[in-house]
Amino acid sequence: MPVKNFLSRSAFLLPPRRVSTLKQRQQLQKTNMSVKGMVIALAVIVCATIVQGFPMFKGGRCLCKGPGVKAVKVANIEKATIIYPSNNCDKIEVIITLKAHKGRRCLNPKSKQASIIIKKTGRMNFLKYQNV
């Protein structure tokens, strides 16, 4: 009787055996790796969407720094470009390209010459789209 009693106690104290094959272990590792990959991809997507909403610069990316000049000689103007407020810059910018490769100048949008240029280009754009 002591032998029977000994066997029952030792069977009770031993933990149950885990029977796993090599294929089961490999499947478990693949599943864990794919779950980790999905979690990492999801984290990157969430971070990218959060960062996209943050403004990169406080003042934006305006082309004109400072208020700009009040006037430019009309004879030196080759082209006038008006950039309206957008997500990049929160102010109107009037950029004048000068003839003879003398560069560009920013006009102060509140100056008299800039307001005339804005009105003329607005009128030209209206007529341009009117004939469509």
Image (cartoon, rainbow, N blue to C red):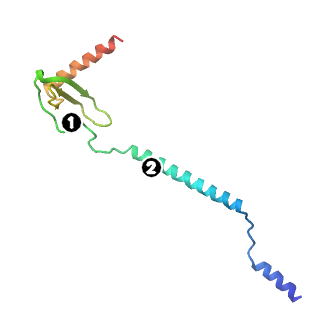
Q: Which of 33 and 23 is in front in this view?
A: 23
> Dot 1, crowdedness within 10 Å: few (<14), some or many (≥20)?
some
Three-letter code, disc 2: Cys
In the orientation shown, which residue stands out farthest toward the top? 131
What residue is drawn where x is 33% and y is 44%? 55
What residue is drawn where x is 39% and y is 43%? 53
**What is the number of callouts on the image?**
2
- Image coordinates of residue 82 in percent, x first then y, are 24, 27
Q: Is residue 40 left or right of residue 86?
A: right
- Image coordinates of residue 52 in percent, x first then y, are 40, 43
Q: Mark 1 points at which residue?
A: 64
Q: Name the residue under label 2.
A: 47
The answer to whether the residue labelled 1 contacts the one labelled 2, judged by CB atoms less than 8 Å apart, is no
Q: Nearer the viewer, residue 101 or 89?
A: 101
Q: In which quarter of the image is residue 91?
A: top left
> Dot 2: what SS?
helix
Q: Is residue 5 above or below residue 40?
A: below
Q: In this view, does 7 lie above or below 22?
A: below
Give how far apart the Cα atoms at labels 1 and 2 are. 32 Å
The earlier-in-sequence mark between 1 and 2 is 2
Q: Quadrant of residue 66?
A: top left
> Looking at the figure, which quarter contains the N terminus?
bottom right
Three-letter code, disc 1: Cys
Q: Could you say which disc has been placed on residue 122 in the image?
A: none
What residue is drawn where x is 33% and y is 36%? 87
- Image coordinates of residue 42 in percent, x first then y, are 52, 49
What residue is drawn where x is 20% and y is 23%? 79
Q: In this view, does 116 lie to the left or right of 58?
A: left
- Image coordinates of residue 114 in percent, x first then y, are 17, 25
